[in-house]
Image (spheres, rainbow, N blue to C red):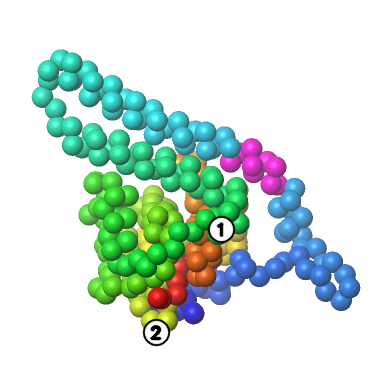
Amino acid sequence: MRSQDLGVGHRTIDDQPLESSHEPRTRFAHGTLELDPRDIQEAREEPGLRVEHVVQIAHDLKSPLHTMALETSILQHRIAAHEPIDAGPVLDRIMHNIEYLDRMVQDLLDGCSPEQTRKTLALAPTDLRTLLETVVERSVATRDRARVFLKADRSAIVMVDDLRIQRVVANLLSNALKYSPIAGGVVVRLDLYEDYCGVSVIDAGPGVTTAEASYIFDKYRRTRSARGREGSGLGLYVSRQIIEAHGGRLDVECVRGAGSRFFFELPLG
């Protein structure tokens, strides 16, 4: 299954071929363990990255909780004062924050035990087109739905854990909306091939560099543009674990300054 088969054409990052994050760097060859300097540096950095990661998660959990508490307090005050209020938009924002928190907690749980994720998949025949429609409806805030363009003309039946694949799509869609300008649209596209299907989430954000692409799916790693933004920092790592547990693959293609295309492929049937 080749990335260029998904219909966007062969694209590169900074006009260089995308480096696969699956290729081993430290390896055993000719009777000698060859240590890649990048692996050594990452081992030194990981404790600090982990602490930074925990602090970021604590902040990101607190922010939506504070927002929900404020929204609820306003509702309670107006109800007690018998003031007219349109509760629909308020409840929509509260529900959006609840779903965001749920994804973060699930990412943390799956990030701690990828093998457990594989063992607990609840596989069932699922129409991927319906799944994508559900994610856009439930996971995208009302104010952002006009920015999302779903291109899924045909059904695609796959044997997957419905809720986990929904989380993958929600994570990719959330990132795309987060890094795209307000005026920029996000395309979610479903493509069908002979024995597999592909889902692409295409944004209009800043893209990533070749160096960032080599670690963007790693645990505890965030790109420069992602630092200071909300999120567990585990979304892409866990998403790749989930897709690979289904026998598929998740990767990224982008051109620096011209957006990114995150895509995953799953076997049909």
Q: The C terminus appears in which quarter of the rendering?
A: bottom left
Mark 1 or mark 2, earlier in chain: 1
Residue 162 x/y as whole percent: 39, 59
Q: Quadrant of residue 98?
A: top left
Residue 189 x/y as whole percent: 33, 68
> In whole angstroms, how far apart are the C-alphas of marks 1 and 2?
28 Å
Q: Is residue 205 above or below residue 191?
A: above
Q: Residue at x 26, y 53 (%)?
A: 137
Q: In the rendered image, which residue does mark 2 sit on?
A: 194
Residue at the right extreme?
31
Report if residue 255 is visible in the image: no
Residue 267 x/y as whole percent: 45, 75
Q: Secondary structure at mark 2?
A: loop
Q: Quadrant of residue 163?
A: bottom left
* Predominant SS of the magenta segment: helix
Q: Residue at x 18, y 20 (%)?
A: 78
Q: Is residue 49 magenta?
A: yes
Q: In the rendered image, which residue does mark 1 sit on?
A: 119
- The segment highlighted magenta reads 45-53
Q: Residue at x 58, y 54 (%)?
A: 116
Q: Nearer the viewer, mark 1 or mark 2?
A: 1
Residue at the top extreme?
81
Which of 241/17 is in front?
241
